[in-house]
Structures are given as structure tokens and as C-alpha cells.
Image (spheres, coloured by chain):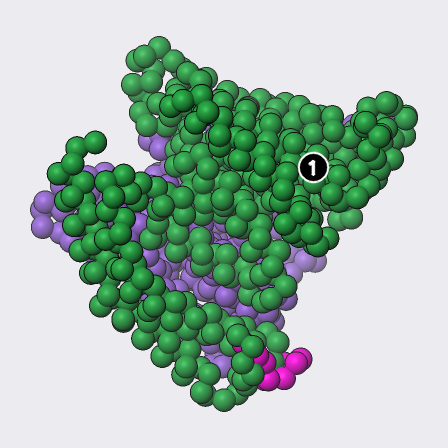
Amino acid sequence: MLEIIVFSTLNGVLYGMVLFMLASGLTLIFSMMGVLNFAHASFYMLGAYFGFEIARRIGFWPAFFVAPILAGVVGALVERFGLRRVHKFGHVPELLFTFGLAFVIEEVVQMIWGKLPVDYRVPPSLDFTAFRLFDTTYPAYKMFMLLVAIGMFVALLLVLNKTRVGLIIQASLTHPNTVAMLGHDVPTIFMAVFGAGSALAGLAGVIAGPAFVTQPGMAAALGPILFVVIVVGGLGSLGGAFAASLLIGLVQTFAVAINGSLADIFGASAADWFGDLGTVTVAQIAPIIPYFLLVLVLIIKPTGLFGTRET
Amino acid sequence: MSALGKIAPWIILAILLAVAPFLFTSGTSRTMLSIMALSIIFALSYNMLLGQTGLLSFGHAVYYGLGGFVAIHAMNTIIRNKYAIPLPVIPLIGGAAGLFFGIVFGSVSTRRAGTVFSMISLGLGELVASSALILRTFFGGEEGITTNRSRLAPFLGYKFGPQIEVYYLIACWCFICILLMYAITRTPFGRMCNAVRENPERAEFVGYSARMVRFIAFSLSGLFAGIAGGLAALNFEIMNTQSIGAAQSGLVLLMTFVGGAATFIGPIIGAILITFLQITLSDITGAWLLYFGLLFIIVVMYSPGGIVGWLALHEPIYRVGQLGRLVPAYAINAIPLIVMIIGGILLIELAEWALVKAESDGPETSIFRIPMSTNSVLPWIAGVVLFFGGALALRRTWPLVQDAWGAALARLREQPA
């Protein structure tokens, strides 16, 4: 039992940190530009596929550095030549643009790399056991992922709070017009933030690709969870996104580890009372728990856990 | 407007619906017409939210799918117990289910408008779609639930075995639903939906609760989506979990937006066009979903009003008789545009063949009925030249359209309507 708790906590924190790598970029893009980027998880997928392709040809470490940059460049180009044009029509067309983009990226990825998962493996240099606890081993690669995620988190905090760039970004979160009047080039800041957010998502993809599955459906599977994270955390709140990422990471990981069902509590007759619900295990409903959480939070506290703004 | 002017479009619609299966007589085209008719209801129900009330939903297939599933279970129950309920009533059962779930989920999601509403609708859509995979008894797992419509009690002697009889059943429902949904837009409630879309704060000052207006619009939209789902159940005689998921929700958004959400007729055109493309394109090319995505992005970027919205821009120009001015400019621009599209299609088809099919079928293919090989450089160069050449030429010729529009608008200002 203790074993399950320890490892589920580790895996849950890890999954939560990966979620936060995406959610932080999404939150920055959203609060700054007002755009809810539907295609954010697609950049995560692009990062994973770029990483796979570079790792296959050159090696994992070049991929680790180059793939996020590539994803960031694609993101910046999308902002410059797509989103900026749609911006003048309002928020709904912007949202729809990213929705269409997510669709196109998935189709293109499917065309280039096929519909089946690709064989993106853990690099040999990280393919060993980190530690052994209660006769269960924990892979070093997952510790590496955790370190990268924490490193990114610290770097993000430092950049936002200690540097001039971070100051401008924070200012244009709340007062974009004032920032423009002070002589800063707001469109370029937007492009840079969108590119940086995409690069962060790409980095998450590069490191998560070997640990999870790299397949064309990975963006569509993660995207909605990401929205749950930033709504539950509170729109536009980085701290909220962090808390919600960990919460959802832990809840989902623990749910997968629990094999109980209503039939275990009420006996075999549960199937008669609840139908399918009686025999479904907690592990089976793990995928829908985040959405329950979303609905619950929106009923109780519509601004999310730490949010202050309405839309 | 005279009484005849008001009724005329409806008579034309009824005639079109009645005559269509005689113009397109093959089995596949009659099936396609049936799907078009029920898609029209689905898209119009979606536009009650997007166009009329300004609510962008990413989970509208929930009400369509649940309506369909309830309808198909109702059909099976009727068959099993030999109730004397005929087939034409079934869509009402689907509609009731859609309305019920619209009320339940609407009470949660319509508290807020804008981006938050969109995300809740997405979350609810995922919630229902994932639940559908778990609740196998009701949703039938991967195989889905099947039925046999011809085993219901006959209606006026019809057993609805042949597709043509089903088409007329769907067409009748389509006509009724279009009429009802249009009527709703003309009521004070329909106007309040527009007011809530434009400015919820002022709508509240007039004395209406914006949330209540959104809630009623959402529930009614669920009702009509459920009717469309019920029609789908009796048309396909099968419902599976795909019809409830994100892909179906995306499809109805595509139909509505490409057709034009700002007008009543837009979603109708969109439903017809997208259904046609869906059925024909998927036979022609493996990259048809990519074309759908690109079509959507292009409409969002260049004509956010959709096809009908773009046409409607010309209405005031037409009224002052200046449409003739635009025709030559459009004609000149059409040439590079078509060249560019041909180049783009050529490149996508070559890439699709080279990446997906060349491995099993070899590099030889034919695009636009011209045989070519993906291994030779020539077709690729041709594609690049056509695409970028067209794009460059279009940049040169586009000012003609701008000038023509400028001149036409200047004339419009001279002649106040």
C-alpha cells in the first residue's frame, strides 16, 4: 500500500509538472493576448515528433535542445502570419483559427509519421534504474523529466520576476496599451511570447515523448485536460495553473492505481442497481475525473481556484 | 413585404426538398440528400448558439448523439413490445432527450458566456464522450447500437424500408424544423438572444436575465440537435460513440462557420456543402481531412462571415446597381487564384502519395487524371511554380478588387437608400 502511495505520488507529481510545462505557456499566451490557444497541445506533439526525428538521426541530446527551438519557431511563424491577421476580427475567430490549426497539424503529422505510434525511446545514457524502493524500481529517465520540469519552473519564475523582459511581459498581461505607449513593440512581444510558449510545450513533448506514447492522437488527448487545468486553476493565474496541474496530475495517477468498484463496496448486487456503473473500476473512470472536477469547480467557484478574472 | 413575399421562400424550399430526389436519382445521392437534410437541422440548431446568441460550443454533438441513442433505444423498445408507435414520431423522442440534456447541462454551462462557456462545453463534451466508452450497455461499446426501422408499425401504409421514403420523412422534419427555428429568430426571445450576444450588460438593463436567455437558447438548441440525432438514428439504423464525440462537434462547427454564422441561411448552405464534400472527397483523396482543416482556416482568416456572409457583403452594392463594376475585377483575380489552388492541391496530393501510399502502391500515381511519379522532380516543381506563381500574381491583381470596391462604395454613399 505504502509502495503504491509513494510511486503514485512520484508519478503524479511528474505528470503534473509536465502538465504545468504546457499550462504555463498557455496561461501566458491567454492572459497576454486573450487567445485561448487550442493548438497548444499540438506544439507539444510537434516537439515530441521533432525530438523523435532528430534523436533517430543525430542523438537525443541535440534533439533535447533543437526540437523545442523548432517548435518555438513554428509557433512564432503561426502568430506572425496567421493569428495576427485574425486578431482584428475578435476573439472568437482567433479561437477558431487555433482550433483549425490543431486539426491541420494532426493531419500533417499523421501524413508524415503515420497513424501508429512511433518508436521514440529513452536514450541509452538515461536508461538505468534511479533507485529501488519496496522491490520496485524507478527509472532514471523519469527523474530526469522531473528535474527538467522543475528547472523550467525555476527559470520561468526568475525570468518573470527578476528580468526586464519579465517585467514587460507582466505589464502587458494587464495593460497592453500602456506598454505600447511606453514605446515597446507589443506585436513583437506577442510573437515572442507565443513562440516561447510553443517552445516550452515543445520541450515538454521532447522529454515526455519517450515516457508516454508518441502518436498523432496525443495532442487531442492532452488538449482538453490542459483547458481543465487552466480553468480549474483560474484563468490567467500562473500560481493557479501550477496548483491545478499538480492536483490533476495526482488525482489522475492515484485513480489509475485504484482497482475498486461499487461492486466491491455493495457486493455483486451493485450491478443490478447501478448497471454498468456498478462494475466500472475507479481506474476505468480516471480519464473522466478531470472533467468532473471542471464542472464541480465551475459550479462552486466559477473563477477557478486562484483566478480573479471572469473571461 | 407583401404576404406573398413572405411565403415565397418557404414554398421554394418545400419544392426544392420535394424535387431533389428526382434530380439526383442514384442510391448514393439519395442517401446523401437524407444526410444533408438532417445536417441542416443540426447546423441550424448549432447556429442558435453561435450565430444568434454568440455562444461558441465545442460539445454540441452531445445533444445530437444522446438524442440519437435515446431514439434508437426507443425504437428497439417499441419493436420488442410491439407498441403502435410509427417511425415519424421517433425524432420527437430524440428531441425530448436533446431538450432534457440541454436543460441539465445548460444549467451548468450557461452561467458564463465567452471563452469560459467554450471551455465548459468542451469539458462536458469530453465528459460525455468518455463516459460513453465506459457505459457499454447503453452506448454499445465499439459496435454501437443497431435497429431496424422497417419493423415499426406502418404509417399511412409506409414501412420506410426504401431510402426514398426515409428521405421524405427527413425532408418533412427538416422543413418543420427550419420553419420553427426561423420563427424563433423573429420572436422577442430571438431578438433578446441577439441583444445578449451584442451586449449582455445592456440586455440586463432592459430587464432580461442574460443567463436565462442563454439557458433557454441552449435548451432549445439541444431540442433541435436531438431531433437531428433522432433522424440520424432512423436513417443509419445504427448509433455509435463517434457520433457523440469531438469530431462530430467539430464537424457541425465547420458546417456553420463555413456557411456563415451571421445569417440564418448560412448554416443551411454550409451543411449542404460540407456533407457533399465529406462524402465525395473521402472517396477521391486520403488527405480530405487536411483539406477540411485548411478550408476552415482559410475561411476564418479571409472571410470570417463564411460563404453567405461574403455574398451578403454585395447586397448593398447590388441594390445601387454597381455589381457590374466588381465582376471584371473578380474575373481577373479568379485566374491566379485558381492557378494557386491547383498548385496547392497538386503539392498536397503529391506529398500524400509520397508519404502514405508510395510504400505499398509504388511512386506512380495520377493527379487531375495526369499520370505522374512522385520520384520525378517535375511534378513537384510544377506544383511549387503554380502555387507561388499564383500567389504572386494574386498580389498584383488584388488591388483591382480593392479599387472596384472603393468605387462601388463611393457610389453607394452618393445614393442614400
Residue A42 visible at all: no
Residue type, mark 1 in image? Tyr
Left or right: where A152 falls relative to A247: left
Can you name the residue that lies furthest to the bottom here? B376
- What residue range appears in magenta? B359-367
* Residue drawn at point x = 65 percent, y = 32 percent: B172
Vertical relation: B78 (above or below) A14: above
What color does chain A have in the rendering?
A: purple
Q: Residue A2, percent across and down?
A: 66, 44
B142 left or right of B197 in image: right
Residue B364 covered by magenta stretch: yes
Q: Which chain is green?
A: B
Left of B80 or right of it: where is B329?
A: left
Which residue is disc 1 drawn over? B168
Of residues B93 and B145, the one drawn nearer to the viewer in this rendering = B93
Residue A131 lies, with reference to residue B247, above or below; the image says below
Rendered location of residue B396, percent (x, y): 22, 68
- Asked if residue A63 lies in the magenta stretch, the reply is no
Q: Quadrant of the C terminus of chain B?
A: top left
Using the image as rendered, state which of residue A264 and residue A183 is in the foreground: A183
Quadrant showing the N terminus of chain B: top left
